[in-house]
Image: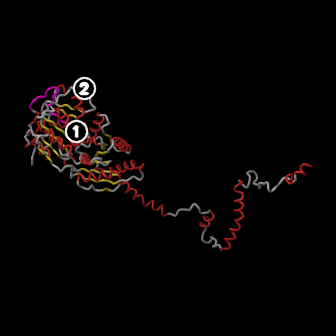
Amino acid sequence: MTKFTDLNLNPKVLKAVQEAGYETPTPIQAGAIPPALEGKDVLGIAQTGTGKTASFVLPMITALARGRARARMPRSLVLCPTRELAAQVAENFDTYSKHLKLTKALLIGGVSFKEQDTLIDKGVDVLIATPGRLLDHFERGKLILSDVKVMVVDEADRMLDMGFIPDIERIFGLTPFTRQTLFFSATMAPEIERITNTFLSAPERIEVARQATTGENITQGVVMFKGSRKDREPSEKRKVLRRMIDAEGDTCTNAIVFCNRKVDVDIVAKSLKKYGYDAAPIHGDLDQSQRTRTLDGFRDGTLRFLVASDVAARGLDVPSVSHVFNFDVPSHAEDYVHRIGRTGRAGRDGKAIMICVPRDERNLADIERLVQREIPRLDNPLAAEKAADKPADAEKEDKPKRSRTRSRKKDDAAQKSPDEAPAAQSTSETADVQAAQEPKRSARSRTSGRGKQSNDRGGNKVVGLGDHTPEFIGLSFKERSAG
C-alpha cells in the first residue's frame, strides 16, 4: 500500500502531513500527486469527499518551496466556484505549508478590496480566488497573471453550473501557455471535456471512481410525499422533515438540509428553530461574515443543523456530518451526488434521505438514471401517524348518529321502556290521527301569508274585515245620501 513517504514530497511538507495525522493517501491522492510533481497536467475525476484538495495542494507547495514571489505577480493560482470552498483551500494551504515560508492571498467577495490589494502588492506565492473577484482585481490593474507557474481549477463541473465557464476561459488566456494545469471535477459534462481538450496538454487522467457515483458507505432513501391540499403542502413537508430527523434519534449528531431555493432555506431554518431544533441558514445572499460564522459553528459542533442552498454542496469538508436531508429533489441530477457527498466522508458511514413530491418525480428518475441505481423508498412518517390515529376514528364512526329529522315524539317513544311503549297503531287509528291534524294544517296554511295568529298583548283572535263589517258599508248610495 502506498504511503505519503513514497510520494517524493518535500520533507517539510511531509512533516506537516504527518502532524495532521495522515499516513496513507487516498486513491485520488496516490494517483494525482506523482504526475503533478513531475510537472505534467492532471485531469482528476473522483467523487466528492475523496481528498481532491490535498491532491493539488501538496504537490503545489512542494513545487513552490523553491523561488520567491514578486509584487502583484502570484506564482500559482487556484480557482474555486464558491467563497466557502476557496476559504477551505486556504485552510489546507496553511496546514500543509506551516514549515515553509510561503505566502497566500484569498480573493473572495464580501471582503474589502483594500485588504486584498495590500496582500497582492507584497507578492504572494499562492493566489486562491473565485473567478469573479479575480477578474475584478485584474481589470483594476492590481493583478498580473503572466508569472503563474501552476494553475488549479477545482470543482470544474460546479463552475459550469454557476455559469463561470466564460470567465475560466478568459483567465486561461491571461496565464502563460507554459503553465502546469491541474483540473479536478466530480463529473465530466461535455462542456468540461471541451475545456480540458482545449487548455490541458496531454493530461494524466486519474479516475478513481465511475463518474457520478455515490459513496458505498452512504445509506440512501427517499420519502414519496403528497400534501393533503396544495396550500398545506409546504407546512406538511416541513413536518415530514422534522419527523424524519426525530426518527433518526441519537444517530443524527448533525446534518445538512439542502433546499433548491434561497427563500426556502430561510423558511426551513426558521421553522426548525421555531420547533426547538438548533438550525441556521447559509446561502449566497447572506453577508460573508455571517456565512463564515455559521460554517464555523457547524464545524465546531455548536450548530447542529445547517440549512443550505447548493452553495454548500461542493467542497465543504466537515468530516463528521452524519446525515444529509434533501428537503427538495435537486433540479440537476449531478447536484445530488455532491449534496450527499457531504456525509460519509473520510471512510465514515453516512445517511442521505430525500423528500420527493409528485412534481419532482421526473427529477428523481434523472438522478436514479445518473447513479445507475434505484434509491430505496421509505415510509412517509405522516402516513404512519394517521394510521396510528385511525382506530380511535373508527370507533367514532361505528357509533350511530342521531338523525336531525327525527321528531321529538319519536325520540320520546324510543326512550320509553318496552313495557311503556304503545302497541302498533292500526291503519284506521293512523287515518283518524291524520284527519284530526288536517284542519290545523289547513288553518296554518291559510294564515301563513298574513303573519301571526295571535297578538302580543292578549292572545285574542284578530278580527278581520270579513268577520265584522261596519253598518254604513251595507247601505246604498241613495240611502247614504238621504241620511
* Residue 403 visible in the displayed image: yes
Q: Is the C-beta separation of discs 1 and 2 under 8 Å?
A: no
| Membership of 113 in magenta stretch | no
Q: How many other residues sit within 10 Å of disc 1, few (<14), some (14-19) or many (≥20)? A: some
| Membership of 67 in magenta stretch | yes
* Front one among 393 and 228: 228
Q: Residue at x 79, y 54 (%)?
A: 465
Q: Secondary structure at mark 1?
A: helix
Residue 475 in the image: state x and y as whole percent: 87, 53
Real-space Cα separation, disc 1 to disc 2, in angstroms: 27 Å
Residue 359 in the image: state x and y as whole percent: 35, 51
Identify the residue under disc 1.
165
- Tell me which segment is drawn in magenta: 66-78
Q: Residue at x 48, y 64 (%)?
A: 398
Q: Residue furthest front?
A: 478
* Front one among 263 and 170: 170
Q: Residue furthest right?
A: 482
Identify the mark at residue 174; answer none if there is no mark: none
Q: How is the image coloured?
A: secondary structure
Q: Residue at x 31, y 56 (%)?
A: 378
In the rendered structure, the answer to whether residue 394 lies left or right of residue 353 reads right
Q: Secondary structure at mark 2?
A: helix
Residue 155 in the image: state x and y as whole percent: 21, 41
Q: How many other residues sit within 10 Å of disc 2, few (<14), some (14-19) or many (≥20)? A: few
Q: Earlier in the sequence, mark 1 or mark 2?
A: 2
Identify the residue under disc 2.
114
* Residue 322 visible in the displayed image: no
Residue 442 in the image: state x and y as whole percent: 71, 62
Q: Amino acid at mark 2?
A: Lys
Q: Amino acid at mark 1?
A: Ile
